[in-house]
Amino acid sequence: MLIKKLSAIAAVAGFCTFSTPAVANETANLKAMLEKQQAQIEALSQKLEKQETVHNEALTHYIKNEVDRALADSSGSLLTLGSNVENLTIKGDLRVRFENRDRDTSDDERNRWRQRFRLGMVWKTNEGWEIGAGLATGGTGYDSATSTNDTYSEKGAFETGDINLDYAYAKHKFDGGVSLTLGQHKNPYVNSDIMFDSDARPVGATVAYAADGFFATTGLYEVWNYSKDTEDSAKMGALQVGMEAGGFTAALGYFHYNSSASVDLGDLEDGYDDSDELGETDFNIVHAYAEYAGKTDSFKYALFAEYFVNMGADKSGTSQGGGDSIDPEDEDSAIVLGAEVGISDFKVSYRYHDTEADSAPAYLVDGDFGGLGTKGHTFKLGYKVTKNFSIGTFYRMAERQSDDREEDLFQLDFKYKF
């Protein structure tokens, strides 16, 4: 019995002795296989990641090509620029206005809401030309040159407004500070907006020069072609020279209208007819303007003065003021004085004017100040709510010199630029 137990113990010991190296070898083999498989898995993962990257790049490239091809195929329905056009700039503004007019000689008090919408575009070409065009609200007729306002529901219930071509021009800049502008464009002459309303757009050709603070502007313009007879076409030639230095601006100008520029506005309200009688007052205007602008740490300011006299007015003419007793020679000059102060987002301005009836053509002057043949005061207060949105008020007191009629005008404006 003892011998059998010893034999069994010896057999187990011998098995363990001879099997331990075999187990160790098997374990090493398994470990090597696992490490090899792990390396293969990592290699496959890297390969898959690389293939995914290549696939994504190919997909992105494919999508881009498809988008480009779609844009090319549909170019007729998208905004494109000519090969000679470098860029296009679009800007505009919307102004909503409440207005109250009150005259002391009658019960003629008027309240109304008005709007002004303007949209301007400028194309610049690689050939040195600038092409500009603008659209604006406003009506048509003899007085449309001085107003782009559209009165709400003036002719019908909830009527829609009118949009007209405000200007269209071509401008080329030459070397040496010289430029040429052709077509209808913004007024290039320095003034206070009384002799020429800010909405007035001269039609014709302007040549301008500016260098080292000196400027000179001249032009020929078709003012009013109100008759089939070309001899009755009102024309104007202008020349203005000036200097700008250290905040000071001074300009001296001469504006010569031909005799056909004298028009009886009363006859033209319903349209011109060859049988209508034209006015006889000539307009040969000498104009002077001076302004000084500066600023401190707290505010900005500007002071200006303007004077113009009509050398063409004489006793033989017919006054724009109406009535045989009015002598154009005694109503030939105008003076304007003004000041403006800007503090932070506020701006305050004041203007005094005394404009005699025959100092300039009545159909081109600013109507808000009261018109020719008046004297009075205007006050403005503006506040810039945001960079592009502002609120402003305007108040004018004016007296018509022919009959001492007084008229007050109040305006409240809400304006947004874009």
Image (spheres, helix red, strand yellow):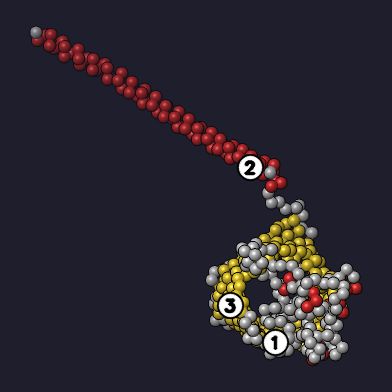
Q: In which image quadrant can residue 310 be found? A: bottom right
Residue drawn at 58 percent across, 40 percent down: 60
Q: Earlier in the sequence, mark 1 or mark 2?
A: 2
Q: Closer to us: mark 3 or mark 1? A: 1
Residue drawn at 79 percent across, 87 percent down: 323
Q: Earlier in the sequence, mark 3 or mark 2?
A: 2
Q: CA distance from mark 3 to mark 2?
A: 51 Å
Q: CA distance from mark 1 to mark 2?
A: 67 Å
Residue drawn at 85 percent across, 90 percent down: 315
Closest to the observer, 264 or 190: 264
Residue lying farthest left? 1
- Residue assigned mark 2: 67
Can residue 396 be seen here? The reply is no
Residue lying farthest front? 107
- Residue assigned mark 3: 393
Q: Earlier in the sequence, mark 3 or mark 1?
A: 3
Pointer 1 with pointer 2, Cβ within 8 A: no
Question: For residue 400, which numbered disc appears in the image?
Answer: 1
Can residue 251 be seen here? The reply is yes
Please tell me whether residue 47 is drawn above or below residue 137 in the rendered image: above
Q: Name the kind of residue labelled 2 in the image.
A: Val
